[in-house]
Image: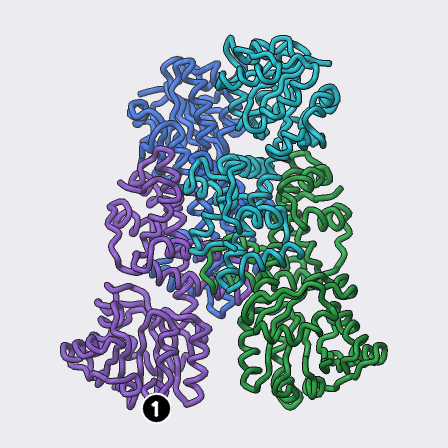
Chain colours: A purple, B blue, C cyan, D green
Amino acid sequence: MPTVAFLGLGAIGAPMARHLAAQPLGLRVWNRTSSRAAAFAAAHGAVHAMTPADAARGADVVITCFPVSGDVESLLDGPDGLLAGLGAGSVLVDCTSGDPATSTRIAARLAAQQVGFLDCPVSGGVVGAEAGTLTIMVGGDAALLERVRPVLEVFGKKIVHCGAIGAGDAVKAVNNALLALHLWSTAEGLVTLRRAGVAPAVALDVINTSSGRSNASMNLFPERVLTRAFPRTFRLALLDKDVGIAAQVAREQRVPAPLLQLTAEFFTAARSALGEEADHVEVVRFIEQLAGTEISA
Amino acid sequence: MPTVAFLGLGAIGAPMARHLAAQPLGLRVWNRTSSRAAAFAAAHGAVHAMTPADAARGADVVITCFPVSGDVESLLDGPDGLLAGLGAGSVLVDCTSGDPATSTRIAARLAAQQVGFLDCPVSGGVVGAEAGTLTIMVGGDAALLERVRPVLEVFGKKIVHCGAIGAGDAVKAVNNALLALHLWSTAEGLVTLRRAGVAPAVALDVINTSSGRSNASMNLFPERVLTRAFPRTFRLALLDKDVGIAAQVAREQRVPAPLLQLTAEFFTAARSALGEEADHVEVVRFIEQLAGTEISA
Amino acid sequence: MPTVAFLGLGAIGAPMARHLAAQPLGLRVWNRTSSRAAAFAAAHGAVHAMTPADAARGADVVITCFPVSGDVESLLDGPDGLLAGLGAGSVLVDCTSGDPATSTRIAARLAAQQVGFLDCPVSGGVVGAEAGTLTIMVGGDAALLERVRPVLEVFGKKIVHCGAIGAGDAVKAVNNALLALHLWSTAEGLVTLRRAGVAPAVALDVINTSSGRSNASMNLFPERVLTRAFPRTFRLALLDKDVGIAAQVAREQRVPAPLLQLTAEFFTAARSALGEEADHVEVVRFIEQLAGTEISA
Amino acid sequence: MPTVAFLGLGAIGAPMARHLAAQPLGLRVWNRTSSRAAAFAAAHGAVHAMTPADAARGADVVITCFPVSGDVESLLDGPDGLLAGLGAGSVLVDCTSGDPATSTRIAARLAAQQVGFLDCPVSGGVVGAEAGTLTIMVGGDAALLERVRPVLEVFGKKIVHCGAIGAGDAVKAVNNALLALHLWSTAEGLVTLRRAGVAPAVALDVINTSSGRSNASMNLFPERVLTRAFPRTFRLALLDKDVGIAAQVAREQRVPAPLLQLTAEFFTAARSALGEEADHVEVVRFIEQLAGTEISA
């Protein structure tokens, strides 16, 4: 079995790393807030690396999981940086929901010292990370994916090779942009109907057995909006970032995508109005405010 | 059992009427193209009425099923019109995917001669109509709905009282507008990904197990777009009409609904480009043309 | 000279009526708030009519000037209504910034009793009304316009026959929609530049000698936004109404007009956020809030 | 007087260079298509430089004028590149309608060898370039601007210091984006009115004395659209590029700018439909096609 290092023990990263720690992979962990890495190492029998370089040294596979690609890029340089530790022939597997442009830059720098790179964003949320059933979208060389597949299978159930470097990032961003779009469109529809005298629960009852249904209407609205629960599971700020990445890819590819571009604008406005800690489903509150009508049961 | 008349033996109306003809309801049928009504009457043991008035005369429940509300409104007047035949205490059940404003006008004219009105658009398509398992969205008086419920149950499986007159129309229009929006948004996403090097089938494989999935991505794209089959099951012109109704309701209710309004614009442009006979899923072709890229397997 | 009646002594209407009162037209005036009409009659030597019917009785030309077409329509009926006073052969000249659909309905009711109708919205604001230099956009029969032209020339400088009934309304609404669009677009541009480090006054200095200039950039931004004066000269609520009329005309004509439709949405949202008394230029404040940046000198 | 070099003898660059050649500036010129530079040098008494390095060698001020910033960036490197010729203390004045990100990168590379940089896009078109009355939008160090001002004054009439490096690019891009927006919005309005029965010339007559007027409505529509002349003076492809730069700046600055972003999409679609050689005003043809109605006199 290969030796593995894991950097970024956040809400998604920590449960992923826990699955890895349960395997004979000589797991080394690093985290920006050092105490989290120390606690993790103590609890799960991993080695607490003091620096990214230290974590990467001797590892066959280094996995990163951060909010944005820029976080990974910023760990590359310096005497403590990843590039100082990564050995020729090793692979960086970046599970960040990143952007293709930054992934491409990172990959080029790694390639210069014979280190491989795969962008591997995941979907499934905290629940999927804890169950080890994540979907993994892979961009990069197919042969490299085969080499690291046994490691990915420790925490992922569905592993999809999407294309060249950046393709994993692009698929993840577009999926999340569709989530954002469907959240917004369903809120527009339900606010309109409520103002026309139709109870949101009645409208959803019909829509969810009809052609207008989506993951947003079937799961998020009944469980989180009608109940006014709005649990904080995935930050609006991060979804805004994802929509922005999808919008950027469309622009670079010169694809007219007006609904996508407009959704990027609206999420930016909603994020600015609702703050950095709001949950992604709370974007519905922004639409409710503009309309002066609430989508409640 | 009540006596029933049915007007409008189109692709959805004919199978609905067939279920009614199999019950002891003394069914009378009328159709603009008279030969269709004659053939239906002969085949299913119904009475072929020569005029709308003739169909309505003596009927407890008159059911109409046409492309737009204006079709129903145009049948009201004149010596052969519905108003000349409908008796006090009878009910007009309009299964057209109509618009609330016209439904409200029709209901007011019927009320003036003690005739009830329910807007009852249906969803489920030709398949649901043939199986007798349609979803029926009802707008109007709840007690009136209870009176006609046994008739609706002959062809409907899920009957939902949505609110006052026009509420059924509104729910149907919003559902279809969400379908339209998700068709368009998913096409934007898949074209973008294809240009970024990701095969549409791979992208859909990921999206359909992730948060961006919708009825459009799970059913329409795999079955109709990737295959390039584009079967003609529901005309783009009719979906454009439905999106327009939803947009109109939002405007009247003063609800800012930018994605919905923009989708109304784009469907109008697509209808004009693709023609009156195009299927609703062919809107994808319009997006493909704008981008110069096809979403094929 | 013909006998003239004037209904609606608001901010625009009163100075228009003042010019008419200075001519030998036997002017009769009516206003919803009766005291305004009484004061006007006393000050300018006109007759204070007690009801719309009373004002219209014996008049050759009846001029109305209200916030919306619905106001005029609501004055038609009843024993005190306009229809009770208007004589065959007289003409209703509606200077309201109205909507074509309502104007068409009003015209049909008047035609039934041999009364002519022209929709004649005006532009030029309070300043133009006081100077008697308004531009008048006329919809309706050209011969009828020639008959009332001497009356219109009392307060208007440029009189343009735009087309059939409703055409005057349509031109006025589209002009105002362009104003709304240019206000919004210029605000987007100036906020963007300010955030990129360019002072709004510097940006306007360039734009106003370049191809991006508009009435909004040349007059409204320098005088009202950079100074933060935001004088209340024309209510945002009324401009929102005008944009809505233009958007409605585009929909009825099946013209894809995405920028116009979107602007209608944004003005509705801005009006809801800023209130009924806000000036139209204050829409800029809404954009500033969404962006978190002010366009000040 | 300083010694000057000029690179990029296109439609705008050539007349600018002609004004410089008439001054005692020891002008050296370079052009990608060498024959143009040879002909220019012969006709105007300038020196024909064989390479960018050769042009820059010994020059105090090097002026570049190309379609996009990337063109300038691509001239920097190699033995024949600008960096090989530019001396410490010299200044690169880039009159390209560029993008701030690339300008910033170019400036950083020049700074490393003590060469100054100013982004100086111009407006005024071919006519302004020939008359020597261009407006120049300057980004970069104010003291540096003072040093080169005498050179800029040879071809520019209005010289505006907009801010730091990239600010000139940003102002130019936003100005052009407003032009694009006003072209599109006015076309939407005129197509709508024409379908409602109002002749475009009549509508423009009103709008151009009213609040909805803009440079587009006052100059471009009467001279180029109503006449169907559509002269080719400025390519749609270049305006699309400018709108894209403005949209990119708004995104980077996190300013919600929905009309701007949407206009970027529509121009991309129009460019793809109309081709690389279409004039910017021909975007009106695209809107006419979508609506099925022409804006002609």
Q: Is residue A201 above or below residue B192?
A: above
Q: Which residue is mark 1?
A: A87
Instruction: Give coordinates of residue C266: x percent, y percent.
Output: 48, 45
Residue in front for this viewpoint, C110 or C207: C207
Q: Secondary structure at mark 1?
A: loop
Side of D47 relative to C276 (left or right)? right
Q: Residues within 10 Å of mark 1 (few under 14, many from 20)?
A: some
Looking at the rendering, in which quadrant would you find the N terminus of chain A? Answer: bottom left
Instruction: Give coordinates of residue C42: x percent, y percent.
Output: 57, 14
Which chain letter matches label 1?
Answer: A
Residue in front for this viewpoint, C7 or A296: C7
Q: Residue at x 39, y 44 (%)?
A: A290
Q: Residue at x 36, y 49 (%)?
A: A286
Residue D150 visible at all = yes
In the picture as drawn, the residue positioned furthest to the front comes out as: C43
Residue B219 visible at all = no
Q: Residue at x 85, y 80 (%)?
A: D42
